[in-house]
Amino acid sequence: MHSHVPTSLSGPGLEAFLHDQIPLTRAMGLRVAESNAQRLVLEAPLAPNRNHLGTAFGGSLHALPTLACYGTLWMLLREAGIDTHVVIKDSQVAYRQPVKGTIRAVCPRPPAATLAAFLAALRRHQKAGLDLRATVEGTDGKPAVEFSGRFVARA
């Protein structure tokens, strides 16, 4: 994995990494819409992610927030100067309403104290877990999908 890590810590670096290492993200049309100190936002167009009803497919509605959380952790680790593998250990998703347009998953960065404890545990034990949440935005301002997952980084 070391040779595949882009030098950029920006959204484009993450997008290139995801498209290279997780081919599904290319098929979904995933793009990094926003990446800053507060949150990561991933988007995917409806067309390649639609179901038989013309709304977003449930699998895509699970995949995009999973990837938003994964991408958040990937970027946090690189910002900390740590090159490690990230995997998802478990997740829960609640589908609240259909998505009829662009799928937009938002993952807020964890609080500084939570991140510091995670990084300290990772450095000490070469393995640590972090709980992250993401939502897929709905048309009425309420979440269409609520996702939570436990991600593990292992040196």
Image: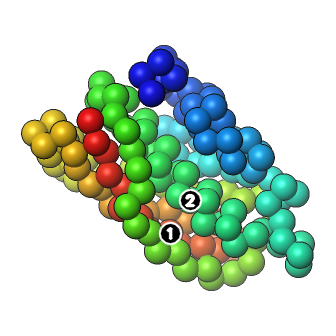
- Disc 1 marks a residue whose amino acid type is Phe
C-alpha distance separating marks 2 and 1: 6 Å
Residue displayed at 34% across by 28% down: 83
Seen at 61% across and 80% down, the residue is 95
Measuring from the top left, give residue 125's x and y in whole percent.
Answer: 13, 43
Q: For this rendering, which residue is in front, 138 or 155?
A: 155
Indicate the colouring scheme.
rainbow
Image coords of residue 152 (percent x, y)? 32, 51
Mark toward the start of the polypeptide (2 vs 1): 2
Residue 38 appears in the figure: no
Nearest the viewer among 78 and 89 is 89
Residue for badge 1 = 147
Name the element at disc 1: strand
Tell me, yes or no, if residue 3 can be seen here.
Answer: yes
- Where is residue 58 shown, x and y percent of the image? 69, 72
Q: In this view, does 112 lie to the left or right of 145?
A: left
Q: Please report the residue visible at 48 percent of the width from the left and 38 percent of the height from the top.
A: 36
**Other residues around mark 1 within 10 Å, as few (<14) / some (14–19) / many (≥20):** many
Q: Which residue is drawn at 36% across and 55% down?
A: 151
Give the residue number, with chain letter if any, for mark 2.
Answer: 65
